[in-house]
């Protein structure tokens, strides 16, 4: 769904949701000790567009989350 | 995303067969109510997005696309009920033919097919809001703030963010719960360790001091510090890491004493008071069956919320959006507010009892290995049963429902002391064990302490990890809330600016300083609009329906532009401006044309004047319109095409249906005459209901055309433009001859009698009338472009009589008279 949306600025070509997710990941990466979490969030939420519980737990807690 | 070139509809909704050429340009569908306009809207939505929102929205009951999408006479062959569209995809610079059938709405056939083209159609399926009716658009401005927030979020696809927020919240809550449990386990392990070492609390100095005392007895060097891996038994040979397989008297004694004391506390007044309170609170929920059912229901609803995967209802497997599902469950749970309050009270009252049982269970588990070595089988079974009963009781109190079982557990708690005797017997047996030597006692002490220290370290590590996860999950959730709220405020601010700007463009005459406020707070989206500088009010408070219509349209356009940006290339506006007055409709047309030059608008209207404005503002070219004249179940809409209607009239008459042909002739002439009057700026006798019959329109139209030709000829004469004069004379002559032939004036003498008398004419007599009127009507149109000749401009001083293509174009401007010669120098100076 989000992959299809474009913003008012044609040059950006990213959706409102993607913009917000990018801002979110940037905010997480700015937190001390959250660098790895931000990388995993970037991978799951933005690149793989996987928003499932499993993907989020993997992003938050790493591969051994379960 | 796309533009539509052609639309072909077969056996779909109220349409039997219809072909439209949209040619990637703006397109208008005009027709009275019930002539089939919405069928075109449905067809576009169906072929592009695979759905028909009019059939699938809220309150549609058992209506569905599959059952009701086909024409009513085509229910047995849904394969034939189909829509095809030739679509141009700008991003691919490619044209594809799309087809869907009612039999399988989700199956899209693309020719030529390609993953890229399918991706574009998936976009369209995700954005069915490209086709909106007035009712749907107006909801953005008139909705209750909470509902508006949901509608706007759904339009902007922000509901996805809400689903993500809920998931992050659920993970954060679960992590907090896990952390709490891990901390409890750590504390329990600490208590077991402290009891075994006979120290007040688990603190490194106390542990070291107690351990080093025993190590000194064994002649072992004291441990300088208690690191994370240090062993209290360091230096002790031949002892493996496991718990000793014999009873360590000192430790066993304190464990049994603790277990006995805990169990004995159940007969005290404090415990009895807790028990009574818990039972009373639980019974309050059980006063009647209805209340009990509500408790069960509330529990079910809570479970349903937890199990919802964001797409399908966990109870019935029906697809449900997050918004729809959350709203349904929330509404039901709100009704159970009283029950929820009582339940929370009962759960609070049960919590300390539950904690006590957990402690008893932990103690029973600690004591059991020693009991296994000392008690006989029967006594051991008593303790084993005690442990199982504690485990079952703890589980039931956590589950809470059914209430009868929870009450049963509470009833038995005070009397659940049978194990006390076994504990007493165990204590006696432990006391009877020989006292170990100081060295043995020290060794046993260190073994037991090390074993429990390791358990404590493990529990501590687990708790630490759980606490770290809980902290991070909560922080990530908080950051998500913060960033999404901030970003959404930015989105709303941009939409607000764009909306106000668009609205000002339409209403510059009286609301040039208009402002608006979109205020997102706590899941609501407040919407205030300026009312002539008197303050901000809800849109429905003071503004007229017409203004509200244009607000809805502007908000929709602002949202779509923000959502799709350059991808906003196609939209269908289904009769969205019905309450907007004529002047503002013109402004809307100009706005759409100027602000959205790359968007293909398909507009439907029942209002011919609105259609005219679309034409005069060049929003829609005359050739890009279709006019529905009538609709029947069997044939669907009949498209207004002048050639066709004359053929149809003649066909009816030839088939001896003179009566039907006469009725059709009269309706068609009324329609055409009204078009001619509009084009030629004819003054027509006022009618309060806006209805004019043929007699009111045709004669004035003929007189006006006659007068306009004369005026144009006089103007041409002033310029001595002989070719133009000759051309106009030919047109005047043709007009006089055909008007005379049609005997319009004669029919006009008593129109009531004569028009109705057409139905009584003989077929050949009637066909003569048809031919005469056909020839007359042709004279109101350009031979080359077929569009009615019109006066330009449509308001103010008349300048030209002309057609669309320019083949007919005569000026009304006369040559100015030459200035008389002057002889007086004074006069010359004055004139210069």
Image (cartoon, rainbow, N blue to C red):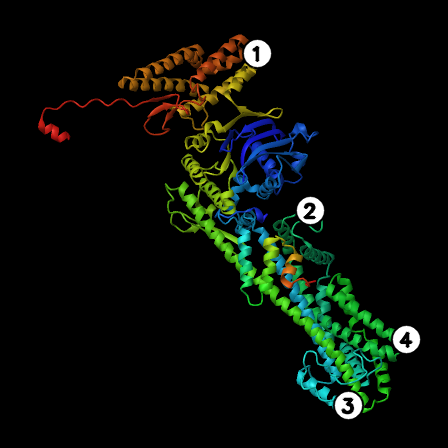
Question: Where does label 3 land, which residue?
Answer: B218
- The N terminus of chain B lies in which quarter of the figure? top right
Mark 3 → mark 4, Cα distance in angstroms: 37 Å
Question: Where does label 1 land, which residue?
Answer: B654
- Mark 2 lies on a secondary structure that is loop
Query: Is there a contact, CB below 8 Å, between mark 4 and mark 1?
Result: no
**Do discs 4 and 2 belong to a common subunit?**
yes
**Do discs 3 and 4 belong to a common subunit?**
yes
Chain identity of mark 3: B
Chain identity of mark 1: B
Residue B142 appears anywhere in the view: no
Chain identity of mark 2: B
Question: Where does label 4 land, which residue?
Answer: B377
- Drawn side of residue B306 relative to residue B258, left or right: left
**In this view, B759 is above or below B381:** above
Sequence-wise, the earlier of marks 3 and 2 is: 3
Question: Where does label 2 land, which residue?
Answer: B318
Sequence-wise, the earlier of marks 4 and 2 is: 2
Instruction: Residue B465: give x, y in percent of width and height.
Output: 66, 69
């Amino acid at each position: 769904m989000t992959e299809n949306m474009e913003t008012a600025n044609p040059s950006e070509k990213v959706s409102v949701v993607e913009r917000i997710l990018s801002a979110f990941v940037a905010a997480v990466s700015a937190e001390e000790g959250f660098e790895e979490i931000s990388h995993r969030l970037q991978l799951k939420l933005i690149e793989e567009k996987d928003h499932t519980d499993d993907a989020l737990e993997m992003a938050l807690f790493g591969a051994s989350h379960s | 995303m796309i533009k539509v070139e052609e639309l072909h509809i077969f056996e779909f909704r109220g349409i039997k067969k219809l072909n439209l050429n949209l040619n990637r340009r703006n397109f208008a569908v005009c027709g009275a109510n019930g002539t089939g306009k919405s069928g075109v809207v449905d067809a576009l939505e169906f072929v592009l997005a695979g759905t028909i929102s009019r059939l699938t929205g809220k309150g549609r009951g058992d209506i569905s696309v599959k059952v009701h999408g086909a024409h009513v006479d085509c229910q047995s062959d849904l394969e034939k009920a189909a829509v095809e569209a030739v679509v141009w995809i700008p991003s691919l610079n490619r044209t594809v033919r799309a087809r869907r059938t009612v039999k399988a709405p989700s199956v899209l056939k693309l020719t030529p097919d390609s993953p890229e083209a399918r991706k574009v159609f998936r976009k369209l399926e995700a954005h069915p809001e490209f086709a909106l009716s007035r009712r749907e658009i107006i909801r953005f401005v008139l909705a209750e703030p909470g509902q508006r927030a949901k509608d706007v979020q759904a339009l902007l696809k922000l509901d996805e963010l809400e689903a993500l927020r809920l998931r992050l919240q659920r993970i954060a809550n679960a992590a907090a719960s896990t952390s709490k449990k891990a901390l409890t386990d750590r504390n329990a392990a600490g208590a077991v360790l402290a009891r075994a070492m006979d120290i007040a609390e688990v603190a490194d100095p106390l542990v070291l001091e107690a351990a080093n005392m025993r190590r000194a007895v064994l002649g072992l060097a004291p441990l300088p510090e208690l690191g994370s891996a240090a062993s209290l038994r360091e230096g002790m040979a031949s002892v493996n890491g496991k718990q000793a397989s014999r009873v360590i008297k000192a430790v066993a004694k304190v464990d049994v004493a603790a277990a006995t004391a805990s169990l004995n506390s159940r007969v005290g007044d404090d415990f009895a008071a807790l028990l009574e309170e818990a039972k009373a609170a639980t019974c309050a929920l059980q006063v009647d069956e209805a209340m009990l059912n509500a408790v069960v229901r509330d529990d079910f609803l809570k479970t349903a919320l937890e199990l919802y995967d964001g797409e399908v209802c966990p109870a019935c497997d029906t697809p449900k959006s997050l918004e729809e599902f959350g709203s349904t469950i929330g509404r039901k749970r709100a009704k159970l507010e009283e029950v929820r309050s009582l339940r929370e009270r009962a759960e609070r009252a049960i919590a300390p009892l539950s904690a006590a049982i957990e402690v008893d269970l932990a103690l029973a588990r600690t004591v059991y290995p020693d009991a296994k070595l000392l008690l006989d089988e029967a006594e051991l079974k008593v303790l084993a049963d005690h442990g199982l009963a504690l485990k079952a009781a703890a589980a039931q109190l956590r589950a809470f429902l059914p209430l009868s079982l929870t009450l049963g557990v509470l009833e038995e708690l005070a009397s659940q002391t049978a194990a006390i005797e076994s504990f007493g017997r165990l204590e006696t047996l432990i006391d009877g064990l020989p006292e170990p030597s100081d060295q043995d006692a020290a060794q046993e002490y260190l073994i037991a302490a090390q074993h429990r220290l390791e358990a404590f370290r493990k529990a501590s590590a687990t708790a630490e990890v759980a606490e770290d996860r809980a902290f991070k999950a909560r922080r990530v959730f908080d950051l998500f809330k913060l960033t999404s709220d901030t970003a959404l405020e930015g989105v709303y601010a941009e939409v607000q600016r764009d909306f106000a700007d668009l609205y000002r463009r339409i209403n510059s005459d009286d609301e040039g300083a208009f402002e608006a406020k979109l205020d997102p707070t706590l899941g609501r989206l407040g919407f205030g609009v300026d009312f002539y500088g008197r303050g901000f009010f809800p849109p429905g408070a003071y503004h007229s329906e017409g203004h509200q219509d244009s607000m809805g349209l502007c908000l929709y356009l602002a949202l779509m532009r923000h959502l799709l940006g350059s991808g906003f290339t196609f939209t269908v506006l289904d009769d969205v401006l019905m309450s907007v007055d004529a002047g503002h409709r013109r402004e809307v047309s100009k706005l759409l044309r100027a602000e959205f030059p790359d968007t293909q608008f398909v507009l439907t209207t029942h209002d011919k004047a609105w259609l005219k404005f679309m034409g005069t503002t060049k929003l829609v070219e005359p050739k890009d319109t279709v006019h529905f004249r009538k609709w029947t179940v069997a044939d669907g809409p009949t498209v207004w095409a002048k050639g066709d209607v004359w053929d149809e009239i003649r066909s009816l008459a030839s088939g001896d249906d003179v009566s039907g042909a006469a009725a059709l002739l009269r309706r068609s002439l009324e329609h055409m005459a009204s078009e001619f009057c509009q084009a030629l700026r004819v003054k027509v006798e006022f009618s309060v209901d806006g209805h004019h019959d043929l007699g009111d329109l045709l004669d004035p139209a003929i007189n006006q055309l006659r007068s306009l030709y004369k005026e144009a000829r006089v103007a041409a004469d002033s310029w001595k433009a002989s070719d133009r004069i000759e051309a106009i004379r030919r047109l005047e002559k043709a007009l006089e001859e055909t008007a005379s032939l049609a005997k319009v004036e004669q029919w006009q003498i008593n129109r009531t009698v004569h028009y109705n008398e057409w139905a009584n004419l003989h077929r050949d007599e009637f066909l003569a009338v048809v031919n005469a009127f056909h020839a007359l009507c042709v004279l109101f149109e350009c031979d080359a472009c077929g569009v009615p000749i019109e006066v330009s401009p449509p308001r103010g001083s008349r300048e030209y009589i002309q057609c669309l293509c320019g083949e007919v174009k005569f000026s009304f401007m006369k040559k100015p008279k030459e200035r008389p010669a002057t002889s007086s120098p004074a006069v010359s100076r004055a004139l210069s």
